[in-house]
Every structure is written in structure tokens, then in C-alpha cells.
Image: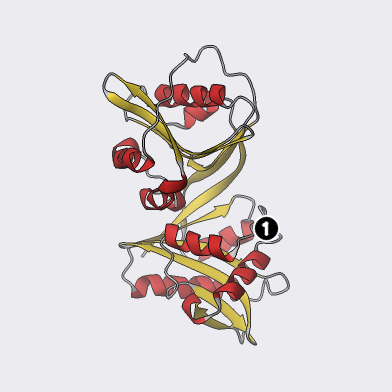
Amino acid sequence: MTVELLPISAVDFAEFTQAFNLAYSDYYVAISMSVPAFRALFERDDIDPDASVAAVDAGRIVGTGLLGIRGQDGWIGGMGVIPGRRRQGIGRAMMEHLIGQARARALRRLDLEVIEANRGAQALYRALGFENRRFLLVLERTPDRVPDILPQCPLGEMDAMSVLDQYDAFHPVPNCWQRARSSLRAMATSLHSWTLNGEDGLQSYALGYADSSALRLIDLAAAPGKDAARSAACLLAALHRTYPGAHASSYNVADNDPVLPAFEALGYTVNFRQIEMRLEL
């Protein structure tokens, strides 16, 4: 293989973005990023351009791979090879390069997500030592009547950054990389925040975007305890009563998240699943 592996910082970012979009143009879920949106993703998810990789052949970028770094933890995302250049060992070479970059930086572990249907990628990651950790669910809800069993609860509002001060306490089960506190804080100024308050203060919160046609939940969490799922369900019910015609979605909710039953109680269904995998270094 004559492909050269270069850090993203050594290639033209617009060309890298174009290659990324081409690599994902026929993926299970098509992804297309503008240059500004891609730069924002790098900031939000702590992508290191010097540790990330572009596979280059005869001056053309044919593969992309991102490495996010937070302390001693790492995350691999954006792994893709353009159509016509797949099954030539480029993906494996990029993965081995990123693992080497992680080890050179003394990271303790690497996480990644792979769509459940992508058997080939799963096999590659397992061959490189990654192990399944949990399922991450992509949830959707079509507009429907809220069950009467859920009480009417007033929605409160709080600054998103203030809500995120409660993040650690409200997440006994950690979110995935792209929904971790660091990523949420980077998005906070553009997120709407809804809260449910009780006698003891904040009981549950949701962060996301909403209008009359769409409700996208970026994070849903509740104070830990036996009533966490019900508190989250009451908040969701209030949201869907406020936006009755909105198609709702939430991305990469862990299958062991304490508030998952709240989504189920409001009629959310699984659109598809990703597998979160981990490599201990």
C-alpha cells in the first residue's frame, strides 16, 4: 500500500472535510458536514488534529480518522474510507496509526462507536483488541398523545451552564463521548434547557433544541434514586404537551441509562443501535 498517513494538521482542512463527506456519503446514516460545522465538532469533542489522521494517496485524501483526547481518555470517530478505495487495508492502517498515537500520548483507553449492522468494522475493531461495552440507542418518537397516567408538571427553565453544574451527580452512568459534560458545555450557549423542580430542588433536566415540528434531546438526566425514571418521564411528558406536534429524537442513549424507561414510557422506539467498544491500553 502506497498510502501515506498524515496528521490532519498537515493537510488542507477543506479537502479533509470533503473526503470525510465522501467517505460517509453511502454510510448507514449519511453524514455531510460544512467546514465551519466540522471545525466546531473538533472544538466540541476535543479532537486533536495532530493525533488524528488523513490517508493520502497521490495527493488525494482517501481516508479519515479522528482522535479525541480528554486527559488520559481517548475516542476514535470519523473513521471512513472513500468509495472505490475500501477493502485495501487503509482502514486497518489508520486504526493502527491512531492506536499508536494514543499510546504515544500515554492514554489509558480508547472508545469508539460502530453501527450494529456494520459487521465488517466490528470485526476489524475486535481484531485490534476492542471489546463491546454497551449498546447506544438512537431513539425516535412520532407525535402522539401523552399518557394520562403521567401528571401535569410545570416546566422550569435554567441556564444550561448552571444545569451542567449538576451533570456528574445526575449521571451515575456516564454518557458516551459526544454527550459527555465537556461536549455539552461546548454546546451550552446554543442549547435550550428545561427543568423539573421539587421540594428538594432540581429533580430532572433536559437539554436540546425544539420548535413546533421537531424536538431533539441532547441530554436527559435525573437526580439519582428510585424516582429518577419517573421524574424524567414527567419532564418528558411536559415537553411533549408543550410541543404536541414535534417529531422527537435522542441520539446515543446508553442501554443502561437510568432514564431510559422514561423514554419508553413516552413511546420512544429504537431506530437503530450502535455498539460502544473500548480498548484498554
Q: Residues within 10 Å of mark 1 (few under 14, many from 20)?
A: few
Residue 217 percent coordinates (x, y): 51, 38
Q: Is residue 89 visible?
A: no
Q: Nearer the viewer, residue 163 or 27?
A: 163
Q: In the rendered view, tell whether residue 163 sits above or below residue 184.
A: above
Q: Residue at x 28, y 25 (%)?
A: 201
Q: Which quarter of the picture shows residue 15?
A: bottom right
Q: In the rendered view, tell whether residue 191 sits above or below residue 12.
A: above
Report the coloring of the rendering.
secondary structure
Number of residue marks: 1
Secondary structure of residue under mark 1: loop
Q: Is residue 21 left or right of residue 228?
A: right
Q: Is residue 184 left or right of residue 162?
A: right
Q: Which residue is mark 1?
A: 27
Q: Residue at x 43, y 53 (%)?
A: 177
Q: Is residue 84 left or right of residue 65?
A: right
**Farthest residue toward the right?**
84
Q: Which quarter of the picture shows residue 120?
A: bottom right
Amino acid on which disc 1 is placed = Tyr
Q: Nearer the viewer, residue 264 or 179?
A: 179
Q: Is residue 146 visible?
A: yes
Residue 180 percent coordinates (x, y): 40, 49
Quarter occupied by the C terminus: bottom left
**Farthest residue toward the left?**
200
Q: Residue at x 49, y 60 (%)?
A: 40
Residue 33 percent coordinates (x, y): 60, 61
Residue 203 percent coordinates (x, y): 34, 26
Quarter occupied by the N terminus: bottom right
Q: Nearer the viewer, residue 34 or 8?
A: 34
Q: In the rendered view, tell whether residue 30 sits above or below residue 48.
A: above
Q: Residue at x 33, y 72 (%)?
A: 105
